[in-house]
Amino acid sequence: MGKLEALVRELGHPDMAWEITVLLGCVAAAYGICWLAGRRRGNDSVWFGRFYFDGLLFPVLALALTYGAIFLLSPFRSVVVFMVAVPVLVSLAGIRFVARVLTVVFPSSGAARLVERVFSWLAWIAAVLWIVGLLPEVKAQLDAVRFTFGKSRISVLNIIEGVLSGGAVLMLALWISAALEKKVLRQAVHDLSLRKVAANAIRALLLFVGLLFALSAVGVDLTALSVLGGALGVGLGFGLQKLASNYVSGFVILFERSLRIGDTVRVDGFEGQVLDIKTRYTLIRAANGRESIVPNEKLITERIENLSLADPKVLVTTEVAVGYDSDVAQVQRILVEAALGVERVLKDPAPAARLAKFGADGLEFSLLFWINDPANGQLNVRSEINLRILQGLREAGVDIPFPQRVVRVLPQPGGAASSAPASPASAAG
């Protein structure tokens, strides 16, 4: 504990108040620069954060100003306060970098918040060890603990350094992909589906390149990955055919734009709106709130009805039967007026009532009408029109027949027929 005692002794020198004042001036200057530069920006920036001091720029500027003060003052006086501030600002910069990047890229992820908290604890522990002078000894102890993997020997320190360097590269790749999506793709690509696939492709490419750089920095021989690539190819060829097909189909759908987010589609009798197109599946939500997860391969290989691709108008029909003694023209007029009285029914093309067929119990009419918002449901508008039809037919005195059957009693051969009358229930059929 000799270094800690020396640090405590040096912190008690008479010029400590003056050093603290200069350090606070550096921190205040860093905050002022962040405020001036970021007051017109949004609150989702990695550089500025939400309150200027919780972004990456504030600790980086404070660290730069602190190093400047150390460079200018160290030839003339002790700078022990500044030397204590440097580890704190370095840890704060790392924490702010990880926290802001994860917040921008994964705004509602619980796993991202857990990674942020774990890294924060490790960074502050490293800062404390740096301040008290124990960090070199801890690194030496970690380097002494070694593991053997085949012909290679690796220490715990190598593993920690590899994880930190790999994490830094991956965070940088995520930051670049998020910045490209926000600054470039949102302005250059207006189609939501195409923008999503471009963002996913850029993020995957940057993460792959970043992972290669991280593995190279740790000392992993990248030529060994060729064996892994061959094994992965064999696995995709045999055991992962469906999974690979779904992923490829997802990119095909997004590039061809045969389906787009917001389209109303019908798949295997399930009709709904496309909420999201993932690389493996597509999420469809019906008007009643039910959601269907459809593998992308199914959307490529089978017949899918896209109700929004060319024309959003949808033809809806409803049937009604009336008595044979009804006025056909009057019934047609009642049906058309019932459809025109509903707001969602289009006036052009106009609704039409047609005599479909001569049924066993009455004249069967079909009412055809168009709507241009199928995403809001079809059963509700059909129900409203049926209620208007029922009211109109009752007011006009038009008979709506129910199924009827006539029972004939024939005499038996060789004698008079005698049969009990049919019950009302059997007569009604």
Image (spheres, rainbow, N blue to C red):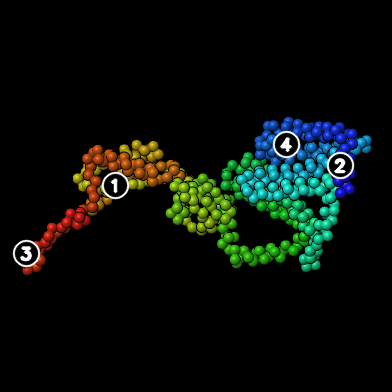
15 versus 361 height, above or below: above
Residue neighbourhood size for the residue with mark 2, other residues' Cα within 10 Å, grouped as few (<14), some (14–19), many (≥20): few
To which residue does mark 1 refer?
320
Q: Give, as a three-letter code, the residue at label 3.
A: Ala
Q: Amino acid at mark 4?
A: Phe
The tag earlier along the polypeptide, 1 or 2, is: 2
Q: Which residue is mark 3?
A: 416
| Contact, mark 2 vs mark 3 (Cβ under 8 Å) | no
The CA distance from mark 2 to mark 3 is 128 Å
Looking at marks 4 and 3 on the same chain, the residue that comes earlier in the sequence is marked by 4
Q: Residue furthest right?
A: 76
Q: Nearer the viewer, mark 1 or mark 3?
A: 3
Q: Secondary structure at mark 3?
A: loop
Q: Which mark is residue 8?
A: 2
SS category of the residue bearing label 1: strand
> Dot 4 lies on which element?
loop
Q: Dot 1, how many residues are within 10 Å of its Cα: few (below 14), some (14-19), or many (20+)? A: some
Residue 63 point in image, percent of width and height = 80, 39
Tag shown at residue 389: none
